[in-house]
Amino acid sequence: MKVRPLSIPGAWEFTPVQHDDDRGSFLEWYRAADVAEAVGHPLNLVQANHSISRQGTLRGLHFADLPPSQAKYVYCPRGAVLDVVVDIRVGSPTFGESEAVLLDEVDRRAVYLAEGLGHGFMALADDSAVTYLCSTGYAPGREHGLYPLDPALGLPWPTDLPRLLSEKDRAAPTLADARTHGLLPDYEACLAYYAELGSRHTSPAG
């Protein structure tokens, strides 16, 4: 497994080694030890989600209140999506910045994003499937969204595809509005939470 930290602290790209022969291919798309080594603690797997999207479907940007927020390991077993991680942690040196990673059925990369980061993706092909391993379960009262077409974010969504958004995502606030209303996570609080997760992993009690 090749591991690459993204430009947004708290996010990594994982690229598996694929073994191909005349029968097909085999790969390990998730390795807990590799994730734990990169992140500093294991992914506490609580829920696994799976979505299938038409070409042009744009899901996100989503995040959850911290603590506990929700860390995600995102993988595309079929089709292709442009996956985007956005730093929405107020006070972060990279606040408002983003990085996009192509997830597809060719290189079979995955992206891990820590608690407190914003996440979204656009399907680049019909019937694109995305599987998310999540550190916490869905909690409607703690879930939030940002408008994914916010000009201030300048996210690199393809311009040659239709943009299919849910009504909820279309009505989501901009980054500036969410900050004004105190919806965004605090960077120092996120760092303290990451340190707490790491100490749980290294403590003698397990």
Image (tube, helix red, strand yellow):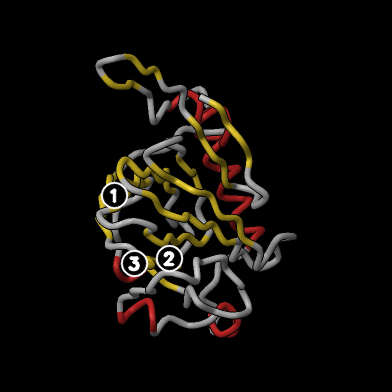
Report x, y in % for residue 20: 36, 18
Residue type for callout 3:
Thr
Q: Is residue 138 left or right of residue 153?
A: left
Residue 166, compared with residue 60, is above or below; it is below
Q: Which mark is residue 202?
A: none
**Residue at image location 39% in from the left, 85% down from the top:** 171
**Residue at image location 60% in from the left, 55% down from the top:** 99
Mark 2 element type:
strand
Residue 1, compared with residue 126, is above or below; it is above
Residue named by callout 2 = 62
Q: Which mark is residue 57?
A: 3
Residue type for callout 2:
His
Nearer the observer, disc 3 or disc 2?
3
For the residue pair 170 and 192, the one nearer the viewer reads as 170
Q: Quadrant of residue 166?
A: bottom left
Q: Quadrant of residue 199?
A: top right
Residue 152, compared with residue 138, is above or below; it is below
Residue named by callout 1 = 129
Mark 3 element type:
loop
**Residue at image location 51% in from the left, 62% down from the top:** 118
Residue type for callout 1:
Ala
